[in-house]
Image (cartoon, coloured by chain):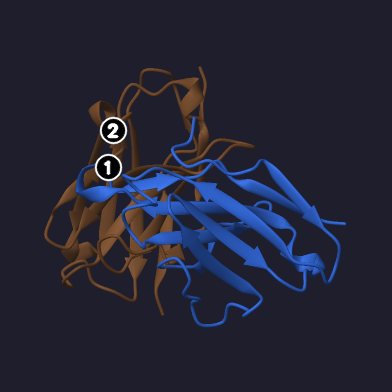
Chain colours: A blue, B brown
């Protein structure tokens, strides 16, 4: 069982927006603004899409955005495109002892 | 340009010890704040963090696997080594190493991963 809870799947049509939630606790998501989001296509390594909750690495489309409220972080993808179909994982810093916790992943289907 | 590459056996037997090496370039593990982590992914399942080592030799382990894991670094060779004891078929997974610019930060660059199968 993963430490962070994500929906198993979400779907949307091209051009629409979708949001993936990532629920943790006051010991991880709620305590630090250090949530990251990764995109993983089948057979590929994960790719960093969002770091420090809402920042995009260079080269990542501004269609991807992140936010947080309390113990829940969210990834929003606007203007869905076929190439966005992938698995998405959230990750949070959880303090100096545990350090890293991942979510269980969400499969995004573009209809 | 930062790159990382995992290497090690593709097949191990139950109860054996797995040793994986992450060889990297484009950064130094003697640079303040930098870390390298190991993450695994069983087929069709989620990512699972295993261990981290930082520039100052600070080491962090997944609480659920701590008793089986050891992470070390060889700064001169630009390598990080992960050992996992008492391997079991449930440890069958793709094992990734990844670069972490500083504590608490994201894993910004990942290796391609190496698939390890545990079977007799």
Nearer-the-camera pick, A54 or B50: A54
Discs 2 and 1 share one subunit = no
Label 1, residues with CA under 10 Å away: few <14, some 14-19, many ≥20: some
According to the image, label 2 marks what residue?
B63
Label 2, residues with CA under 10 Å away: few <14, some 14-19, many ≥20: few
Residue A100, above or below B93: below
Residue A76 appears left or right of A108: left
Where is residue A104, by image quadrant? top right
Nearer-the-camera pick, A88 or B93: A88
Where is residue B83, by image quadrant? top left
Q: Is residue A102 visible?
A: yes
Q: Chain of mark 1?
A: A
Q: Kindly report the distance in space between the C-alpha atoms of the residues bearing marks 2 and 1.
A: 7 Å
The residue depicted at 50 percent of the width and 24 percent of the height is B90
Where is residue B1, by image quadrant? bottom left
Q: Give how far across and how far down residue B37 sits, in percent.
A: 33, 53
Nearer-the-camera pick, A29 or B5: A29
The residue depicted at 71 percent of the width and 45 percent of the height is A9
Tag 1, which secondary structure? helix
Residue B119, above or below A1: above
Residue A51, above or below B17: below
Q: Give how far across and how far down residue A107 sits, in percent.
A: 70, 48
Residue A70, above or below B32: above
Q: Chain of mark 2?
A: B
Q: Give how far across and how far down residue A85 sits, in percent.
A: 75, 59
According to the image, label 1 marks what residue?
A98
């Amino acid at each position: 069982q993963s430490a962070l809870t994500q929906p198993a799947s979400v779907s949307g049509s091209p051009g629409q927006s979708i949001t993936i939630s990532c629920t943790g606790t006051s010991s991880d998501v709620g305590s630090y603004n250090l949530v990251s989001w990764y995109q993983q296509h089948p057979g590929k390594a994960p790719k960093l899409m969002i770091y420090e909750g809402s920042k995009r690495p260079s080269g990542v489309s501004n269609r991807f955005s992140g936010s947080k409220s309390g113990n829940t972080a969210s990834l929003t993808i606007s203007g869905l495109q076929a190439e966005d179909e992938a698995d998405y994982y959230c990750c949070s810093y959880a303090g100096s002892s545990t350090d890293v916790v991942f979510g269980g992943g969400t499969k995004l289907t573009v209809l | 340009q930062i790159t990382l590459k995992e290497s090690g056996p593709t097949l191990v037997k139950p109860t054996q010890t797995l040793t994986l090496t992450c060889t990297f370039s484009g950064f130094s593990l003697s640079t303040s704040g930098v870390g390298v982590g190991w993450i695994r992914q069983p087929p069709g399942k989620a990512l699972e963090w295993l261990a981290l080592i930082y520039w100052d030799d600070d080491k962090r382990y997944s609480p659920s696997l701590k008793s089986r894991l050891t992470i070390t670094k060889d700064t001169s060779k630009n390598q990080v080594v992960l050992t996992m004891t008492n391997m079991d078929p449930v440890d069958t997974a793709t094992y990734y190493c990844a670069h972490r610019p500083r504590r608490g930060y994201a894993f910004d660059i990942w290796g391609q991963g190496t698939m390890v199968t545990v079977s007799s």
